[in-house]
Amino acid sequence: MILVLNLNASVDKRYALADFAKGKVVRAKAVQNTAGGKGLHVANVAHALGADVVTSGFVGGKAGEFIEERMTAKGLKGNFTHVAGETRSCLAILTDDGAQTEILEPGPTVTASELADFRARYTELLADADVVVASGSVPQGVPKAIYRELIEEAHAHGIPFLLDTSGEALSAALPAKPDFIKPNKDEIEALTGRTVTSESDVQRETRAFADAGIPFACVSLGADGSLAIADGKSYRVHVPRIACKNPVGSGDSFVGGYATAIAMGKSPQEALRLAAACGTANAMEEESGFVRREVVEELLPQIEISEV
């Protein structure tokens, strides 16, 4: 079973606009509301690939009910801690010029008793987990070191832990050596203070993560693929050119593909191929954090991976 942690879930609202101007009345051409949060995208993709997935975290209020209802309708299993506060909404505004503006609410404040409930729930869920994935930000009231603690508990049971977060939550977790990280260039610069402008810079930084004891580190290069290091070997990934409809959730889809492959016992290189195919397949869809299994399978042989 893949245990996905989405601590700061959201209702994702996607607005398609002709243009977006401050201080104006703007009418949306289309609106899409989905059960969101990075972890839910991961779970959705892993489920589409046929994996057994359980998602946990915090949900509350009518927005939390909406998320659980949408998950049930899709056949996704949830085991959440319910909080008194209202689950947040996150807005993505896409305009005809291809720009995307995001407005992310902070989310509810989690109480000490709610956090204790989640920690007990997490310990119980670990008993059946083959791999743990944690994605996204940490809600208010939850310590920034939470991911480090969750990694350490998973590792104590011999369970790999994949982490996709940023900022203080990422820097606090790195000493626990998550089995997977996926920082972008800006996040690497914030972590290290070093400038990242070229592929050689990216390769240097992924090597530094490996030297620090992190088995897999990957940096996306957008439409140009990605650079990764897995078990000490560096790989350059090239993905096919596609007609991109919506890139939102492609990184989460990458994580979902990688987690599924690891749960199946695939090698890091095979997992990297499936991850890249899922990230690409997501960009071909209107819905964020969504892939079609048949599209992923068509893309797999088109993913080029070379050792560098």
Image: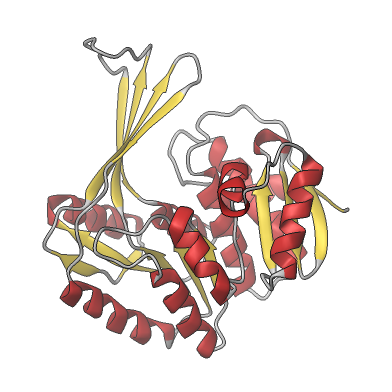
Q: Residue 8, how many percent across, how many down?
A: 31, 57
Q: Residue 256, how many percent across, how many down?
A: 54, 58
The part of the image, by quadrant, that contains residue 269 is bottom right
Q: Is residue 301 visible?
A: no
* Residue shown at 21% from the left, 53% from the top: 87
Q: Residue 117, how many percent across, how many down?
A: 22, 79
Q: Residue 214, how many percent across, how many down?
A: 66, 70
The structure's colour scheme is secondary structure
The part of the image, by quadrant, that contains residue 143 is bottom left
The part of the image, by quadrant, that contains residue 89 is top left
Q: Could you tell whether 184 is left or right of 305 in the image?
A: left
Q: Which residue is the extreme one toward the front?
A: 193
* Residue shown at 56% from the left, 73% from the top: 175
In the rendered image, the vertical position of residue 102 relative to residue 267, given as above or below: above
Q: Give the number of marks.
A: 0
* Residue shown at 22% from the left, 60% from the top: 59
Q: Could you tell whether 304 is left or right of 160 in the image?
A: right
* Residue shown at 68% from the left, 65% from the top: 216
